[in-house]
Image (cartoon, rainbow, N blue to C red):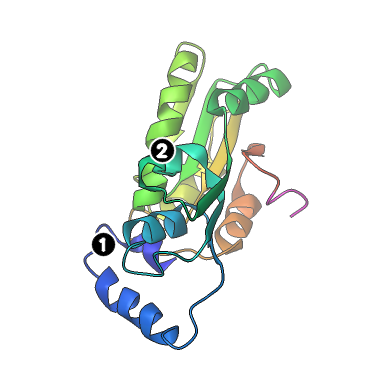
Amino acid sequence: LLNARRNSDKSDAPFVEYLRSLNVDQPPDLIIAIGAPAANFVQAHRKDLFATTPMLFTLVERRRVDFSKLTEYDTVVAASNNDAVFFENILRVLPLTTTIAIVVGASPSETWWRNEVAKSTARFADRVKFRWYNELSFEDMLKDGANLPPHSAIFWIGLNVDAAGVAHEGNSAFSRFYRVANAPIFFHDETFFGQ
């Protein structure tokens, strides 16, 4: 979460030194980087942190891994998303949809996802209107999500940091959003199913 809020890696040096000092007497046997922020961090500091310790990158989208920076000690178990399929699914399930609100935060990682998903949604622009929430505070997202026009759907990418710079942890933002949303919510994974 702290990584998600930052726009630069200038504050990494103290954290890198902290990790190094924690493990000076007994380096880890394996490092597991879970998710894109972790993968980005360890790739940026691989030579400074346990350069020859085996590392596993997982729960990361393939596009988020810099394969040119991998070492002989690195293994990647990545996912590959076809973002357009998510929107095809919405339009198949709700063929009358005219508006899709996309919930995504404003952190560097979320901005990357917003830009990637925007490429995939361009082909649907003649059929539906997209409302991007990355430039809204969470309070404004709640207001808009409660007042969407008829034949709307919501696609939840994720929310770590809103446009006001407020960090949101775990499922709390989704739970609040779900309670006020006036349209069905779709996801790219099953994390929130059954919530």
- Between 119 and 17, the one lying in front of the other is 17
Residue 188, percent across and down? 62, 39
Residue 187, percent across and down? 63, 40
Instruction: Please report the residue visible at 42 percent of the width from the left and 51 percent of the height from the top.
Output: 71
Q: Quadrant of the C terminus?
A: bottom right
Q: Which residue type carries mark 1?
A: Asp
Q: How would you rate the neighbour count of disc 1 (Cα within 10 Å): few for under 14, some for 14-19, many for 20 or more?
A: few
Is 87 left, or right, of 120 in this rendering?
A: right
Instruction: Please report the residue visible at 56 percent of the width from the left and 67 percent of the height from the top.
Output: 30
- Residue 9 badge: 1
Q: Name which quarter of the figure residue 161 lies in.
A: bottom left
Residue 89, percent across and down? 67, 24
Q: Which residue is mark 2?
A: 114
Instruction: Please report the residue visible at 39 percent of the width from the left and 68 percent of the height from the top.
Output: 2
The magenta region covers 191-195
Q: Which residue type carries mark 2?
A: Arg
Magenta-drawn stretch contains 194: yes
- Between 120 and 129, the one lying in front of the other is 120
- Between 55 and 16, the one lying in front of the other is 55
The answer to which of marks 1 and 2 sits earlier in the sequence is: 1
Is 96 left, or right, of 69 in this rendering?
A: right
Distance between the alpha carbons at the discs numbered 1 and 2: 21 Å
